[in-house]
Amino acid sequence: MTPDRSSLIPALKNVATRLRIDSVRATSEAGSGHPTSCCSMADVMAALFFAEMRFDPHDPKNTDADRFVLSKGHAAPILYAAWAEAGAFDRAELLNLRKIDSDLEGHPTPRLPFVDVATGSLGQGICASIGSALNARRIKSDYRTYVILGDGETAEGSVWEAADTAAFDGLDNLCGITDVNALGQSRATMWQHDMDALAARWRAFGWHAIVIDGHDLDAILDALAEAKRTKGRPTMILARTIKGKGVSFVEGKDGWHGKAFKKGDELDRALAELERQFVPAPAGVNLTSLIPKPAARPRAVESPKPVAPPAYKLGEEIATREAYGVALAKLGEADPRVVALDADVKNSTFSDKFEKVFPDRFYENFIAEQVMVGAAMGLAARGAIPFPSTFACFLSRAYDFIRMAAISNVGIKLAGSHAGVSIGEDGPSQMALEDLAMCRAEPNITVLYPCDGVSTEKLVSLMAYHPGPAYMRTSRPKTPVIYGNDEAFTIGGLKVLRESSSDVATIVGAGVTVFEALKAHDQLKASGVNVRVIDLYSLQPVDRTALIAAAKASGGVIVTVEDHYAAGGVGDAVAEAVADAGLALTRLAVREIPRSGKPEELLDRFGISAKHIVDAVRSVVPALK
Amino acid sequence: MTPDRSSLIPALKNVATRLRIDSVRATSEAGSGHPTSCCSMADVMAALFFAEMRFDPHDPKNTDADRFVLSKGHAAPILYAAWAEAGAFDRAELLNLRKIDSDLEGHPTPRLPFVDVATGSLGQGICASIGSALNARRIKSDYRTYVILGDGETAEGSVWEAADTAAFDGLDNLCGITDVNALGQSRATMWQHDMDALAARWRAFGWHAIVIDGHDLDAILDALAEAKRTKGRPTMILARTIKGKGVSFVEGKDGWHGKAFKKGDELDRALAELERQFVPAPAGVNLTSLIPKPAARPRAVESPKPVAPPAYKLGEEIATREAYGVALAKLGEADPRVVALDADVKNSTFSDKFEKVFPDRFYENFIAEQVMVGAAMGLAARGAIPFPSTFACFLSRAYDFIRMAAISNVGIKLAGSHAGVSIGEDGPSQMALEDLAMCRAEPNITVLYPCDGVSTEKLVSLMAYHPGPAYMRTSRPKTPVIYGNDEAFTIGGLKVLRESSSDVATIVGAGVTVFEALKAHDQLKASGVNVRVIDLYSLQPVDRTALIAAAKASGGVIVTVEDHYAAGGVGDAVAEAVADAGLALTRLAVREIPRSGKPEELLDRFGISAKHIVDAVRSVVPALK
């Protein structure tokens, strides 16, 4: 039975004190961490975990459980303390904080079953929480999503992208709490304790905002109840708090961010003071046993149907970006978990083909790439298969999110269109020339780069079901279909498009340069020179064995050609794969900042057209020199 | 003599009509571009360029000239039209828009003398304009900075980082104008024409906001005057406009974003309608001749003094991040153009050493990396030498800005601390393991990675005066000083730290791995095996000749070792440099998502410690197998 407020409050107060003690003790034991950032939010955490959220400490991933996202990830110790307090694991474990063999890391990662997405890069948790809230709507669950932000964190622009998006989507199942402790790492925050100014910002972005004393448990409970009653828009509770609350010699003091109390006198004083804050509580109130469990809600299993196969004619021209849209719509038909996210370029990436059929599973983020990727992280963590897409160059706007998605190892399926100089007249600001470098750098991101309609469709399905994050690069120009509709593709594969018994070199292209390589092949062949041509559609992983075999069968000479800068793309992928095979590698890539012009002019000007491939072969093959 | 309003308005109206005609004509000639996005802002452009700004069309870079930044870069044609109208170049040139041999690119780049920074990735121009406004304060100039944003653009979080920063800095010399045409690329904007809601947002962020009809020239002139009178905070003019204004068959219509009128009937109809909009204007009013020139303001030339040399003892321990702070303060002493920008980690990057001496040249952006880098771009474009610094991993938050800084080729001097797993317990979210990949991908970014105090100080000075953008990676742990205070360094250089006539391999390290390589050297030497050790402090450019020479003198074997993921870092830099030298290359790098732990534990767990180097040498050197 839920205790009444007069019994609940002292019990929660004691929970908050225990959470403070655990946070202080664990960070001192680790010798580093953020106890003062934990102490400011302890009362809110106590109320959330022991008088608000519905969850099962032993089944944290339950489909209908309320979600908690710690956007201010540096307060990890109190997150761990709360789950220990709830009984998820033994409190003694907390003292292993930050040790190499413990999953209680310095900042939360999904190595822990109760963490949906890694946090610790500020301004990201709130974006992921939007994905979590959208997912509840998708699966028709009444679970609510709670997210705690730091006040300093709200300087991140991504927080305001999230604010816009959550308001636009009317996410009344989302409740944010800002821990306004007024101190950043190196100084006071910009807005300090100006609670009215902070509330005005959230209200101006369409949220319901509530200002409270973040150490007043009554006020916290009232605010959470008000948030739950508020319909049609999300709520932000702005909790005025004191950094280091409970340890008087650090309360509200600058210079204590990210500092553990030194073991010995300093720690002892802190702990003694905290211990004195326990209050008499009514006997028999066991808050942990009272945590409401999520409703056992029977659901039809969402089993995917087969994806409709490609239906192209050989030689038919279609841009891979358009084939991506076709594929996405087909995939959406086959699997209700597939959702798409856009940043106001759906008519260029062709994700609008998906929207037309599945408007309820299409999320518009307007021109805000960070929240698009962040929301996708939250969706993926909750069981959806999200495809966020925009121009590939603008994915660089969300690189920190992509980095954290890799750390989280969540299955976001990124698609970037308009790769390279082949976009033409729009100029360098719209050309992605570092997207492969960006995504290949993350060791667990699958990187795919199809050249025609068939391979695009096949690879979209493969990436959907391949575990972990993935990236597909698509192109703006139309290219001819070169594969039959029943051609098989694999992640980590490649295709040998031309070969003979007298090849003198292997040309490795991907995307638009496959067609430059084929042209070069034909031109060389006309002059009696045979070369092998490879479509390297899978850039991470790479089919090392096939690459080496092809090169060895063609005089040990490889020429790579890519519509990407020289570092981090096709050339580097091939170079690392064949590093110890004793091959001669020549790379053609874009080696300077490009400019506006016609696509074919630019391919030529920046050294990646058929002509340059022919020249490269002639200059590196010993017999042709 | 300035004409009175009754003469001025019709003259401006005709300028606006000409700007519309020029934008429509140029995009139709190019066959692509954004005429409707130009038409909505034509009246504002006419007022800004011909009744507000002080500039010299023939000396656009004048130190005291008012600045204009087109944050909505896709409206480039009207920017070009305005400068042509002002007499900067022949109007006939406008018809070369988007051609490969014209600098009138699809989106503005500083190839044009009147463009300070490239725009076209939305939400960046307003950040750069903050740098421009800060620079006016730095050089004590009264020039004002004007920036036009699209309304769709304000979905970008970076716009709100800029809003916060400009308000905090009290930039009353900055005036923004939002062209609220209510239509994005693919649909209506989120806030459409809800002008009160838009104004509330800017007011909540501390700006003075003025709502006007953006086609009412009287209202535009009044608003600009009000902005000029407003002290202590920046002003945002929210101009309600119609997309495609002036061409009735596209006005306010969805589906016309980024579409040129088709030559022939469609274009003819548009032009005919625009031509009819010329109004009778008083004779003798020549607005171009009336553009107020910037005051000729004599200034002492800011000539730099020599930078104080490093003052370390060999073997003394100092983290490179701390040496960076020391170097920055010394550089600031030598050169008044040097400024520093922070994102609330100044006490970790040690940029606070600069702030303590030069508080007026230190700009705090709180936790907002995008505006930090964007403001640096604006500062660099106006003659300052800006050093924005934060944790290296959080520079990924600003990758799109770094990309645009590369396109702009502006001299921002990025510094990222806390590189790699060697940061230890904070865990993967705080570890930069893709920053080298990110920066090396841009062909014109200089990438430096010092290992000790002396090299850090020397390289900070070198990067300050090297043209174009540069990145320095620094480390968290203390490392011993290994170079004498008078050691010379060069961009593109390296240091051979150990060598003998019997080396069997060359180990290439950088940063913290230099010390692992030195340890490996000593261990191998103790067992009678000699290896060469290289400190590759310059990763872009790389000293190819010296690398090949070292490797050839050591059995043709190279082992690279880096505290970075395998793709895009030291290994790839070395591999490309030596690609055609027939060497055997082995790379040690972090190949999976790391975790929390002690630095030395992590170096070992993730395969980049001395032990792993020794093992690698033993496994790849034929004679040791």
Image (cartoon, coloured by chain):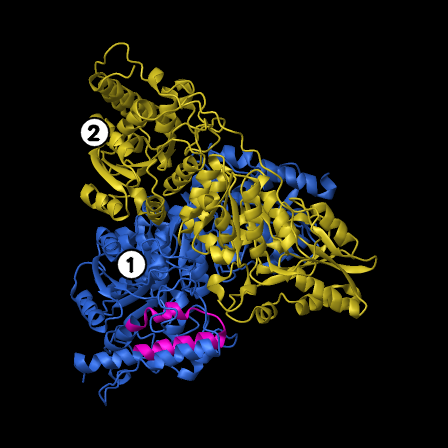
Chain colours: A yellow, B blue
Which residues lie in the magenta part? B16-43
What percent of the width, then of the height, locates residue A179? 27, 36
| Amino acid under disc 2 | Ala
Q: How many marks?
A: 2
Task: Specify the quadrant that holds the N terminus of chain A.
Answer: top left
* Left or right: A48 in relation to A508: left
User: Which residue does the image show at 39% across and 66% down from the upper left?
Assistant: B73
Q: Quadrant of the C terminus of chain A?
A: bottom right
Residue A439 pos. (x, y %): 53, 49
Q: Nearer the viewer, mark 2 or mark 1?
A: 1
Q: CA distance from mark 2 to mark 1?
A: 37 Å
The answer to whether residue B467 shows anywhere in this view is: no
Q: Which residue does the numbered mark 1 point to in the structure image?
A: B193
The residue that label 2 is drawn on is A219
Whether B110 is drawn above or below A416: the answer is below
Q: Position of residue A615 (x, y in %)?
A: 70, 69
Amino acid identity at mark 1 = His
